[in-house]
């Protein structure tokens, strides 16, 4: 009883979410294992560890691939590969909640365990309706992108596969050279726009469609997201302009790859390993960010950086006015202290896992940069990095134990860490 009092709200959280956490984790683990069977049984990925890695990379929308020749796969397998992205993008659990209203109140606990971001909002009083609205929006945007890609010269199969990959911020492409295969500026601009939409908060998109424009203008994360995209794109444009064919080409390549890395999509149209150091540096920084909360992207999420930046500003104010009382203001409302604590804990745990994952990779003999890069792209579900993990390269052939560890890390990153890492606490199992 004494332990329970000391734990306070932590105990209550464990009691409320115990079944939800277990269900979510095992749902994603089972999806990764079962999703590997088509790859393994077809013989195109004869190693089961590699098949599981490819499947987990698909469902978690990471997009790292062990395949050397993607175009050698038959179309049914390529479609399954793209479909794992699309299902994992909005979340298998959200789909479950949408289709199984009998989950009732427990449904919101499942969505909280799977949803990307520090807080989960509802757009309707019932979480099942919220999940259905979000899936409807997801389907509409996917269909819109598919139609546009077909209109601009892509065949139906490739268009569907790339729409699945883009809207899920995944990265799997049916082509070895990804978007570079098509040599089409207009296709690249279309994918850039939809990557940015996929990395944006879906609830805000839904509210925009309902005419609630004020919510967008006063949203702190939306403003920060726009500023990061604009600043990163312009800096990269300035860096690569001397080696680009034209200003339009530099802008297109800069904003395409900014969107791809920031939203953790991972498709590519250019070998940015050949870019100047400044441009590569910007992309490397973007790997630490991620898209918006409530999106299909991975990473830490911009809202967490906004919260920490505001808290840092408050700490500076306290130095100047020690007796002052300062609260974080988010979108015109006072932020809860619990959210600030949660964000700080999440960011700390995120970087600890990056370092531990980098150590795991380095145990296989990889250099420090490759180890850190691998940790970033797996935990952040980015799928694409710099150096040997860059464009036009398959994922390095790590030992089996490293690939199993990275598969676990991809799931942990997709489920926002807490849902998985809570299993490693004694208090969870005491419940």
Image: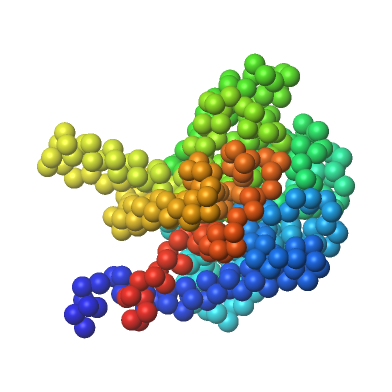
Q: Residue at x 69, y 54 (%)?
A: 66
Residue toward you, 387 or 379: 387
Q: Residue at x 24, y 78 (%)?
A: 4
- 120 in relation to 283, above or below: below
The residue most toward the front is 365
Q: Taking 167 as reference, is 110 left or right?
A: left
Q: Position of residue 301 (x, y in %)?
A: 48, 48
The residue most toward the top is 242
Residue toward you, 398 or 77: 398
Q: Position of residue 80 (x, y in %)?
A: 76, 63
Q: Taking 426 as reference, is 61 left or right?
A: right
Image-quadrant location for residue 310: top left
- 331 in relation to 99, above or below: above
- 197 in relation to 254, above or below: below
Could you tell me which quadrant the C terminus lies in?
A: bottom left
Q: Residue at x 19, y 80 (%)?
A: 2
Q: Is residue 134 visible?
A: no
Residue toward you, 224 or 79: 79
Could you tell me which quadrant the N terminus lies in?
A: bottom left
Q: Is residue 50 visible?
A: yes
Q: Position of residue 280 (x, y in %)?
A: 56, 31
The residue most toward the left is 323
């Amino acid at each position: 009883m004494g332990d329970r009092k000391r734990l306070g709200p932590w105990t209550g959280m464990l009691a409320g979410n115990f079944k939800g956490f277990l269900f979510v984790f095992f749902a994603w683990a089972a999806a990764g294992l079962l999703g590997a069977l088509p790859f393994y049984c077809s013989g195109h990925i004869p190693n089961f560890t590699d098949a599981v890695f490819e499947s987990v990379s698909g469902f978690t929308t990471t997009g790292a691939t062990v395949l050397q020749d993607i175009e050698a796969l038959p179309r049914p397998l390529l479609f399954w590969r793209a479909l794992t992205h699309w299902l994992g993008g909005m979340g298998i659990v959200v789909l479950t909640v949408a289709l199984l209203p009998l989950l009732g109140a427990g449904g919101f606990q499942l969505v909280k365990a799977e949803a990307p971001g520090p807080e989960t909002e509802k757009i309707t009083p019932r979480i099942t309706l919220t999940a259905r609205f979000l899936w409807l929006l997801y389907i509409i945007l996917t269909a819109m992108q598919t139609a546009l890609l077909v209109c601009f010269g892509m065949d139906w199969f490739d268009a569907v596969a790339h729409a699945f990959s883009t809207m899920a911020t995944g990265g799997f492409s049916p082509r070895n050279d990804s978007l570079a295969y098509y040599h089409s500026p207009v296709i690249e601009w279309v994918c850039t726009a939809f990557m940015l939409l996929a990395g944006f908060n879906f609830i805000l998109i839904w509210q925009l469609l309902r005419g609630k424009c004020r919510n967008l203008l006063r949203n702190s994360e939306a403003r920060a997201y726009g500023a990061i995209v604009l600043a990163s794109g312009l800096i990269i444009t300035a860096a690569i302009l001397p080696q680009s064919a034209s200003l339009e080409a530099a802008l297109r390549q800069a904003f395409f790859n900014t969107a791809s890395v920031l939203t953790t999509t991972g498709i590519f149209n250019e070998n940015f390993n050949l870019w100047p150091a400044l441009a590569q540096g910007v992309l490397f920084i973007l790997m630490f960010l991620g898209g918006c909360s409530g999106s299909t992207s991975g990473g830490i999420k911009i809202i967490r950086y906004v919260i920490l930046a505001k808290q840092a500003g408050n700490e500076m104010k306290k130095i100047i006015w020690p007796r002052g009382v300062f609260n974080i203001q988010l979108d015109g409302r006072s932020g809860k202290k619990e959210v600030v604590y949660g964000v700080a804990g999440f960011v700390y745990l995120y970087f600890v896992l990056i370092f531990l994952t980098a150590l795991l990779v380095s145990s296989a003999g990889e250099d420090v940069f490759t180890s850190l890069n691998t940790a970033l792209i797996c935990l952040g579900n980015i799928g694409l990095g710099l150096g040997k993990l860059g464009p036009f390269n398959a994922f390095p052939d790590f030992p089996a134990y490293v690939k199993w560890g990275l598969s676990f890390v991809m799931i942990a990153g997709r489920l926002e860490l807490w849902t998985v890492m809570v299993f490693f606490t004694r208090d969870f199992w005491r419940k």
